[in-house]
Image (cartoon, rainbow, N blue to C red):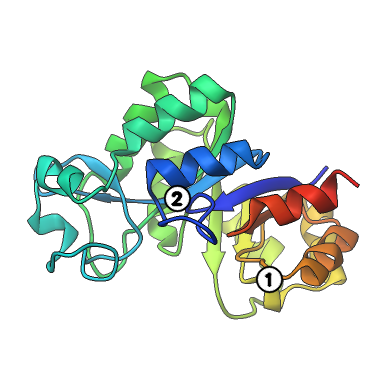
Amino acid sequence: MVLNFAHRGASGYYAENTMLAFGKAIEMGCDGIETDVQLSKDGVPVLIHDETVDRTTHKKGYVSDFTFSELAELGIPSMEQLVVLAKRCSKLLNIEIKNGRSWYEGIEEKVIGIIKKYDMTHKTILSSFNHYSMVKCKMLCKEIETGLLYVEALYQPEKYCGYVGADAIHPNYIVLNKQIVKDVHEAGYKVHPYTVDDQSVMCGLIEMGVDMIITNYPDRLSRILNK
């Protein structure tokens, strides 16, 4: 079974990483929601992709320069708000820890703390392009699944996945082929490509046997999976 994960919510139609986009994705039949987490100035995990608020709000500046109350006024939700929604609607979560240019001290502990608070440990996968962060998450809570995000083609990604101690690879779909998927599965790991909006590409990935598809258009994927 291929899981349908909404990339930043139903962001093909609604403002990304907003409660509206998350709610609409659920209405469209997604299995889970993918989102991005960073920390506010006062240490609250908030859901926004960019390290600045410039692109998605009318303000300018780094996320870490605003308090949560200031970010909330800009329409940026807290991670806790989404976790509450996912729990109420029995949906899965894929939370990407944005720990790149801005290295958020203690973000892993805060994120895992919220997941545990709502008993979502077995319904959440944490991912990141920062693989150090993924190693730390496993050290903090081995029960939570982790996924390794990457853009370029990795040689024998199943071996790297084992070396890092992760549960899945989260590659750009362009670098995948059937043999890679087969090798990763035979090694005991999962394959969760992003961000797939073309329906013919979705069908190709389903044919390859991937475990999850992350898309801006969960309704398109839902129609394909329910045929």
**Residue 56 position (above or below residue 4):** below
> Percent from the top left, x then y, of residue 136?
38, 47
> Percent from the top left, x then y, of residue 186?
84, 53
Q: Quadrant of residue 155?
A: bottom right
Badge 1 element? helix
Residue at 34% across / 28% down in the picture? 114
Q: Front-most of 44 and 90?
A: 90
Q: Front-most of 171 and 58?
A: 58
Residue at 85% across / 68% down in the picture? 204
Q: Within 10 Å of the Cα at label 1, are there few (<14), some (14-19), or many (20+) other Cα atoms?
A: many
Q: Within 10 Å of the Cα at label 2, are there few (<14), some (14-19), or many (20+) other Cα atoms?
A: many
> Percent from the top left, x then y, of residue 80?
33, 31
Residue at 47% across / 53% down in the picture? 8
Is residue 154 at least partly visible in the picture? yes
> Percent from the top left, x then y, of residue 40?
16, 48
**Residue 138 position (above or below residue 9):** above
Is residue 188 at least partly visible in the picture? no
Q: The residue under label 2 is which amino acid type?
A: Thr
Q: Residue 134 carries which label?
A: none
Q: Quadrant of the N terminus?
A: top right
Left or right of residue 215: residue 94? left
Q: Front-most of 55 and 125?
A: 55
Left or right of residue 150: residue 186? right
Real-space Cα separation, disc 1 to disc 2, in angstroms:
18 Å
Q: The residue under label 1 is which amino acid type?
A: Tyr
**Residue 168 position (above or below residue 204):** above
Q: Residue 35 carries which label?
A: 2
Badge 2 element? strand
In the rendered image, which residue does mark 1 sit on? 173
Residue at 14% across / 42% down in the picture? 68
